[in-house]
Image (cartoon, rainbow, N blue to C red):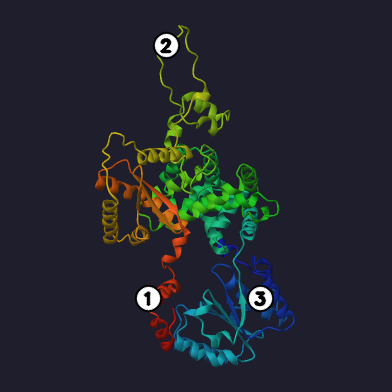
């Protein structure tokens, strides 16, 4: 059996032109070599798998090729020294390295020292390396590579020329995988390679490792289904199907589809994040100016543009907000599945037009689905009737005893398929207000109406005033103390207030006050009439200035006290 070499090693770049996605850095290094303008200490930093060590090896080889007449096949292996700082991080390792630096090369012009994972060096090792790095021999070049630049001490960073490697874009990774497929005679779908590039998350080495794994699973036919199955990722079609159900307000089907997703082993958090990204992509696809922001394959891009025409911008913005809210609350939730299901039901209810006024967390009532007859469900699938026609309130008719015709009654039409009004509709709120008003205006014709005097009225009034003070309702108690109640003919109690604000507050407390007076005076025919009398407004002190003036009227010496001590109000 032929020995297998992983793609990450087999297709490792041998020249700067083979390096993927780092054109700015490779061009800079090429020009520095040609113009003899290369620094003696270089630092390559960036994420894993983006080509730092590969560029270091290519640079080490090219330096000696340019400075000698040797053939291009000469790799100058004796002039290149690699040190893994993860396992050689002590002071003794660095001192051994500095001792070797003094010896000039036997062939070629330069000795190149590549120190990988340089951030793993100890503090003492860094300090031992400082002098050599600042003033190296003319034949020595140091190339340091790290994924964590912030762990390197500033005195080392200041002695190096820093090159920041960027993450490999999805498009660059996909194109490189497509080139490898051509060399290996592998038939691969564009969407399949795109998913692999996305899964790699900017690391070319990870993309090649995933590519080898999927090829071992599917053989020379690389399909989107095989990639999603092997990598255990949710396919685009899953989100397209879910979005169609959400736009059609089909809550039962949405919940069943989510249950199918969970049964395949996917986590709810992963699904809701992907759904939010899907809504974002649909929002981007609605405008030709932003379609280029879609980071998907050509086939998937057509599906996004097609589905985005079905969804309104307001729906997508609200759906993204709901999905993001679910994402934020997912970890803290004790019933995470229920949280996702509630979010899906709320999203499915966004475009529902059965209710004129909906709250932010509105969910279509279950009665909407249960009240549909089989015929109505069949028509709703064919888009013959809107949800407004189906979701009209049920009109109850009082049966009348009369002789009915013997002819059979016609079958009920779809327009008669109605549902009961929602508890949150405007009609139900109005009905509740009418019922409350009826209760407050109850008829007391059969109740006692004993005669009472002005003195008795004032005593009962004062008792209620003291009761309010004990209960802590000082605002209403102060209003009752603003004036004395006056008994008029017909058991009408007249009470004057200086402003409308106090009148409105008393109107809210009036039912309890009225009940207390009626029970205490045994007269259920009495009424309270509140009138505005602005002439008494100045009798009461509300602001600090009014209170000060009130006190000054009683004792003029207060003003002298205020001036003597320079007091504020």
Q: Nearer the viewer, mark 2 or mark 1?
A: 1
Q: Are marks 3 and 2 in contact (CB under 8 Å)?
A: no
Q: From this view, report whether residue 345 is shown above or below residue 290.
A: above
Report the residue marked by disc 2: 402
Q: Are marks 1 and 3 in contact (CB under 8 Å)?
A: no
Q: From this view, report whether residue 33 is shown above or below residue 402.
A: below
Horizontal and vertical percent for residue 330? 42, 55
How crowded pointer 2 is (Cα within 10 Å; few <14, some 14-19, many 20+) is rated as few
Q: From this view, report whether residue 355 is shown above or below residue 462.
A: above
Report the residue marked by disc 3: 74
Assign a secondary structure to mark 1.
helix
Of the pair 505 and 16, the residue shown nearer to us: 505
Q: Quadrant of residue 100?
A: bottom right
Of the pair 497 and 453, the residue shown nearer to us: 453
Assign a secondary structure to mark 3.
loop
Residue drawn at (53%, 90%), measured in percent from left and top? 130
User: How many callouts does the rendering have?
Assistant: 3
Residue drawn at (62%, 62%), measured in percent from left and top? 169
Horizontal and vertical percent for residue 318? 54, 50
Q: Nearer the viewer, mark 3 or mark 2?
A: 2
Which badge, 3 or 2, is on the more N-terminal residue? 3
Gap between marks 2 and 1, in whole Å?
83 Å
Which badge, 2 or 1, is on the more N-terminal residue? 2
Report the residue marked by disc 1: 554
């Amino acid at each position: 059996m032929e020995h297998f070499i992983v793609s990450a090693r087999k297709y490792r770049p041998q020249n700067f032109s083979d390096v993927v996605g780092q054109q700015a850095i490779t061009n800079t290094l090429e020009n520095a070599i040609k113009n003899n303008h290369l620094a003696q200490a270089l630092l390559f930093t960036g994420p894993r798998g983006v080509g730092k060590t590969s560029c270091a090896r290519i640079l080490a080889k090219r330096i000696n090729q340019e400075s000698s007449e040797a053939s291009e096949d000469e790799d100058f292996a004796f002039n290149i020294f690699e040190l893994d700082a993860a396992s050689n991080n002590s002071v003794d390792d660095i001192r051994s390295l500095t001792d070797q630096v003094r010896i000039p090369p036997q062939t070629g012009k330069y000795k190149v020292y590549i120190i990988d994972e340089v951030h793993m060096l100890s503090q003492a090792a860094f300090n031992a390396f400082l002098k050599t790095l600042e003033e190296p021999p003319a034949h020595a070049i140091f190339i340091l590579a790290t994924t964590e630049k912030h762990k390197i001490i500033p005195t080392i960073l200041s002695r190096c020329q820093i090159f920041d490697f960027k993450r490999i874009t999805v498009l660059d990774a996909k194109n490189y995988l497509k080139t490898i497929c051509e060399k290996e005679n592998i038939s691969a779908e564009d969407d399949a390679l795109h998913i692999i590039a996305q899964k790699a998350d900017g690391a070319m080495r990870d993309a090649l490792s995933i590519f080898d794994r999927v090829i071992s699973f599917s053989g020379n036919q690389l399909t989107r289904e095989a990639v999603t199955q092997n990598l255990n990722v949710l396919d685009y079609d899953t989100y397209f199907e879910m979005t169609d159900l959400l736009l059609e307000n089909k809550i039962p089907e949405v919940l069943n589809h989510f249950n199918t997703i969970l049964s395949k082993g996917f986590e709810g958090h992963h699904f809701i994040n992907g759904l939010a990204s899907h809504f974002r992509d649909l929002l981007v696809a609605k405008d030709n100016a932003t379609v280029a922001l879609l980071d998907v394959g050509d086939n998937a891009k057509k599906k996004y543009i097609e589905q985005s025409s079905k969804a309104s911008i307001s729906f997508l913005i609200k759906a993204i907000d709901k999905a993001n809210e679910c994402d934020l609350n997912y970890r803290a939730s004790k019933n995470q599945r229920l949280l996702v299901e509630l979010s899906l039901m709320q999203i499915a209810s966004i475009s529902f037009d059965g209710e004129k006024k909906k709250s932010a967390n509105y969910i279509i009532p279950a009665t909407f689905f249960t009240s549909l007859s089989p015929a109505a469900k069949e028509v709703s699938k064919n888009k013959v009737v809107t949800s407004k026609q189906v979701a009209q309130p049920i009109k109850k008719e009082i049966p009348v005893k009369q002789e009915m015709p013997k002819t059979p009654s016609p079958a009920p039409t779809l327009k008669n398929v109605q549902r009961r009004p929602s508890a949150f509709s405007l009609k139900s709120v109005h009905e509740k207000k009418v019922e409350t008003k009826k209760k407050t205006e109850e008829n007391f014709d059969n109740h006692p109406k004993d005669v009472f005097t002005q003195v008795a009225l004032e005593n009962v009034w004062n008792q209620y005033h003291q009761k309010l003070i004990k209960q802590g309702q000082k605002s209403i108690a102060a209003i009752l103390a603003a004036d004395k109640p006056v008994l008029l003919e017909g058991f009408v109690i007249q009470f004057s207030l200086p402003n409308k604000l106090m009148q409105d507050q008393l109107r809210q407390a009036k039912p309890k006050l009225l009940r207390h007076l009626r029970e205490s005076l045994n007269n259920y025919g009495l009424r309270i009439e509140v009138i505005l009398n602005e002439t008494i407004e100045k009798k009461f002190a509300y602001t600090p200035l009014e209170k000060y003036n009130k006190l000054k009227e009683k004792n003029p010496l207060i003003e002298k006290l205020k001036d003597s001590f320079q007091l504020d109000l």
